[in-house]
Image: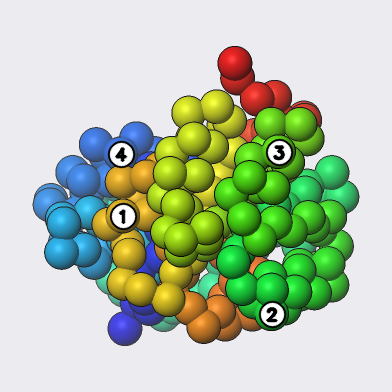
Amino acid sequence: MTGEGLYGIGAVAKMVSVAQQTLRTWEDRYGQIVPERTPGGQRLYSRDQVDQLLFVVKAIARGVQPADAHRLLAERSRQPVATQSELDPTFSILIADRDHFSADLCEYFLRTEGYAVRTATDVVAARQILENDPPSLAAIDLLISGGKGAELCLLTRQHLSIPILATSTLESHDAALDAGADAFLSKPIDPLRYVSTVRDLLGTSAYVRRPVWAQ
């Protein structure tokens, strides 16, 4: 078992510093790391698969050929790859969620991890934050303001180069990825998975400097 698919191929390419086409080639050629496919054909990688790709990339960096790196992956016993342990206090999160309880719960766990967090319960308030004081990451409920979360994801992607985590009580992987989200989580939210997903996405971001809304 490799776990539930969470991350779109664009986010994974950033996480492991490998071109999307290379990831597709490895999938077809070696068949070791095969992501889930959504009904719409989008690739979704699990956290375990990201760990496996990091193992392969590190082996290649040491001079191992890609085919041999994938053979080593097949032979090894699963070993967790270390994740980012020290959080940058400059990282801030926007939680745009129609559900006050869900927003408060996620805010609590993120603040416990050391992140600065702001919340918005409608698209208007969320957009004001995005435009006036852009966060390092936006977590957007697709059903906010009567289902306008996908539009908010698209708007955010058009104007900001930040990771986007989409959430929903509906099965909305395709809608989330098509709207520019980097990852999708189903509700009700599992707090540990939520925090680890945020950590993973921020670990891919080079935008520690303050993001700027592109006019």
Q: Is residue 131 left or right of residue 197?
A: right
Q: Quadrant of the N terminus?
A: bottom left
2 or 1: tag closer to the N-terminus: 2
Query: What is the crowding at mark 2: few (fewer than 14 residues within 10 Å), some, or many (at least 20)?
Result: few
- Displayed quadrant of residue 172: bottom left
Which residue matches tag 1? 175
- Taking the spot 16% from the left edge, 57% from the top edge, the residue there is 40
Which residue matches tag 4? 20
**SS for dot 3:** helix
Question: Residue flagged by tag 1: what amino acid is it?
Answer: Ala
Which residue matches tag 3? 128
2 or 3: tag closer to the N-terminus: 2
**SS for dot 1:** helix
Residue 133: % across, % down: 78, 35
Q: In 3D space, how far apart are the residues under numbered discs 4 and 2 (Cα atoms)?
A: 37 Å
Q: In 3D space, how far apart are the residues under numbered discs 4 and 1 (Cα atoms)?
A: 20 Å
Q: Nearer the viewer, residue 113 or 16?
A: 113
Q: In 3D space, how far apart are the residues under numbered discs 4 and 3 (Cα atoms)?
A: 33 Å
Camera-side mark, 4 or 2? 2
- Do labels 2 and 1 touch, CB within 8 Å? no
**SS for dot 4:** helix
- Taking the spot 79% from the left edge, 57% from the top edge, the residue there is 117
Residue 141: % across, % down: 52, 62
4 or 3: tag closer to the N-terminus: 4
Which residue matches tag 2? 101
4 or 1: tag closer to the N-terminus: 4
Query: What is the crowding at mark 4: few (fewer than 14 residues within 10 Å), some, or many (at least 20)?
Result: some
Question: Residue flagged by tag 3: what amino acid is it?
Answer: Gln
Vertical side of 125 occupied by 109: above or below:
below
Question: Residue flagged by tag 4: what amino acid is it?
Answer: Gln
